[in-house]
């Protein structure tokens, strides 16, 4: 930990301020600090041994009647500052920095012992990390009840592909270090987190002959390939005779082989309850073949997590049932859950309700926070952080490790439609490089069944290696 700093803050929205101060100072920067609240303070002032940093307080200075109302949303188009005009340097994706909340003229100025920052770094970070706009916005959700990227401020203002909160933290740190060079921050380390949602562990094992013939007929019409037809037929027969290694979706060993070859672990998320609906799973978590996969994952040192069902995202009883069953199967398979982590099926996160239910279920880490229709930095950050319940006004025990890329968001026609090839590679690599710039955690989701497609498997390996 570094040397202690002192924060003087206005007293409005005290719980919310305490949360964001702690996230930025303790979680992100690793600095010791003390905060005092006063009705007389008009801005946030950080007092150091050799000077002070004063920051805009635009967001939390709103009238309480505007809280969680449309009138509290940022005024667009957003103002921008230019890094070249700053009296000190800092990490950023580009020279122009969008200002979510701040002064009318949000510039950065320095006198001998004081730096004034016209960006409301704390309020803007709170807005992004809590997904404030998703609670306030009246924008129509998509067919799966998800908040779409196109409705977000980040997409509309062109900063979805940059971790804007991480950039704000770098501005703050550079200001502190400029006046107090003896300060020592917590160092982050770039890492790649490989994750795999197990929607379908097997293509053929749980498929009836009647269903198989329908699928085969559809594939013939779609692919018009006799080679693929005979390959699927051969795999189906082999799997039904007990050779599950022939199932095209049974890619677990291959995934772990590759992860181990580059010194990484894979995280696999399994659906615990099948409610008999098309958009849930087609497997039973208690099935002996699934339990065998659990054991293999554990034996090889990789991670098992819960994939909250389509129905469970906003249903407390269902999510609790799923969490309990997942724990039961893990216990029976002797799989230790050192850190209970989960991701929502279809990324169906309802903010903050889903987070509250996850906390009640004893889940400690969520990895769902990415838009389904566009990859990027949904919460504006590439570091893990504790979540906040806007409705109850409290910090949660649940932490978020934001998902940055889901493969189908980038590849599939229904979303970004970049296809399998150079466009997808360049886009995903750019997000990875941006994450690396801030020594962040690049969380990548690639479903196990997508490795059936050889071109996608090659793309995955090229991105990760």
Image: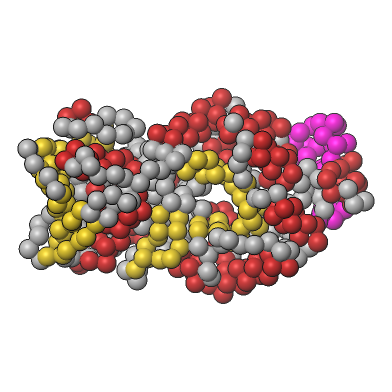
Q: Is residue 148 visible?
A: no
Q: Is residue 221 visible?
A: yes
Q: Is residue 212 left or right of residue 2?
A: right
Closest to the observer: 248 or 462? 462
- Residue 67 part of the magenta-drawn span: no
Residue beneath the point at 31% across and 45% down: 185
Closest to the observer: 78 or 340? 340
Relative vertical location of residue 70 with respect to residue 55 in this rendering, above or below: below
Q: Position of residue 55 (x, y in %)?
A: 16, 48
Q: Quadrant of residue 279?
A: bottom right
Q: Is residue 63 left or right of residue 380?
A: left
Q: In the current view of this chain or complex, which residue is farthest to the top? A: 422
Number of labels in the image equals 0
Q: Is residue 83 left or right of residue 47?
A: right
- For the stretch drawn in magenta, the main secondary structure is helix
Relative vertical location of residue 328 with respect to residue 399 in this rendering, above or below: below
Q: Position of residue 133 (x, y in %)?
A: 34, 55
Closest to the observer: 296 or 181? 181
Residue beneath the point at 55% across and 29% down: 425
Q: Is residue 63 left or right of residue 458?
A: left
The residue range painted magenta reads 206-232
Residue beneath the point at 65% across and 40% down: 259
For the C terminus, the quadrant is: top right
Q: Position of residue 247 (x, y in %)?
A: 81, 45
Q: Quadrant of residue 118?
A: top left
Residue beneath the point at 45% across and 32% down: 433
Q: How is the image coloured?
A: secondary structure
- Residue 211 part of the magenta-drawn span: yes
């Amino acid at each position: 930990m570094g040397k202690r700093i002192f924060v003087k803050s206005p007293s409005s929205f005290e719980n919310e301020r305490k949360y964001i101060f702690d996230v930025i100072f303790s979680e992100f920067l690793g600095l010791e600090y003390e905060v005092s609240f006063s009705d007389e303070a008009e801005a946030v002032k950080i007092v150091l041994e050799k000077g002070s940093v004063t920051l805009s307080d635009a967001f939390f200075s709103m009238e309480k009647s505007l809280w969680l109302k449309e009138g509290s949303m940022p005024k667009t188009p957003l103002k921008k500052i230019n890094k070249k005009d700053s009296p000190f340097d800092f990490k950023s994706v580009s020279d122009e920095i969008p200002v979510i909340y701040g002064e009318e003229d949000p510039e950065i100025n320095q006198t001998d012992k004081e730096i004034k920052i016209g960006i409301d770094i704390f309020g803007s970070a709170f807005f992004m990390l809590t997904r404030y706009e998703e609670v306030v916005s009246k924008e129509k959700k998509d067919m799966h009840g998800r908040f779409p990227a196109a409705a977000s401020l980040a997409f509309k203002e062109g900063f979805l592909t940059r971790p804007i909160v991480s950039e704000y933290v770098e501005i703050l740190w550079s200001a502190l270090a400029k006046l107090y060079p003896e300060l020592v921050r917590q160092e982050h380390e770039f890492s790649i987190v490989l994750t795999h949602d197990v929607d379908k562990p097997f293509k053929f094992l749980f498929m009836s002959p009647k269903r198989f013939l329908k699928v085969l007929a559809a594939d013939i019409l779609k692919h018009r390939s006799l080679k693929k037809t005979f390959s699927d037929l051969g795999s189906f027969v082999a799997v039904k005779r007990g050779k599950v290694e022939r199932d095209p979706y049974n890619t677990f060993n291959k995934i772990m082989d590759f992860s181990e070859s580059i010194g990484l672990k894979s995280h696999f998320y399994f659906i615990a309850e099948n409610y008999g609906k098309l958009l849930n799973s087609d497997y039973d978590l208690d099935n002996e073949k699934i339990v065998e996969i659990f054991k293999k994952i554990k034996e090889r040192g990789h991670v098992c997590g819960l994939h909250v069902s389509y129905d469970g995202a906003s249903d407390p009883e269902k999510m609790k049932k799923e969490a309990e069953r997942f724990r039961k199967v893990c216990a029976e398979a002797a799989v230790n859950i050192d850190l209970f982590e989960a991701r929502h099926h279809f990324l169906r996160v309802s903010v903050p309700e889903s987070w509250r239910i996850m906390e009640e279920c004893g889940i400690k880490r969520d990895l769902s926070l990415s838009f389904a229709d566009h990859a990027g930095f949904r919460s504006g950050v590439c570091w893990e952080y504790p979540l906040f319940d806007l409705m109850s006004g409290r910090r949660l025990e649940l932490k978020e490790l934001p998902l940055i890329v889901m493969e189908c968001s980038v590849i599939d026609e229904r979303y970004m439609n970049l296809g399998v090839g150079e466009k997808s590679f360049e886009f995903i690599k750019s997000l990875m490089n941006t994450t690396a710039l801030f020594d962040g955690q690049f969380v990548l989701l690639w479903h196990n069944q997508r490795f059936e497609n050889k071109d996608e498997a090659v793309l995955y390996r090229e991105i990760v290696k």
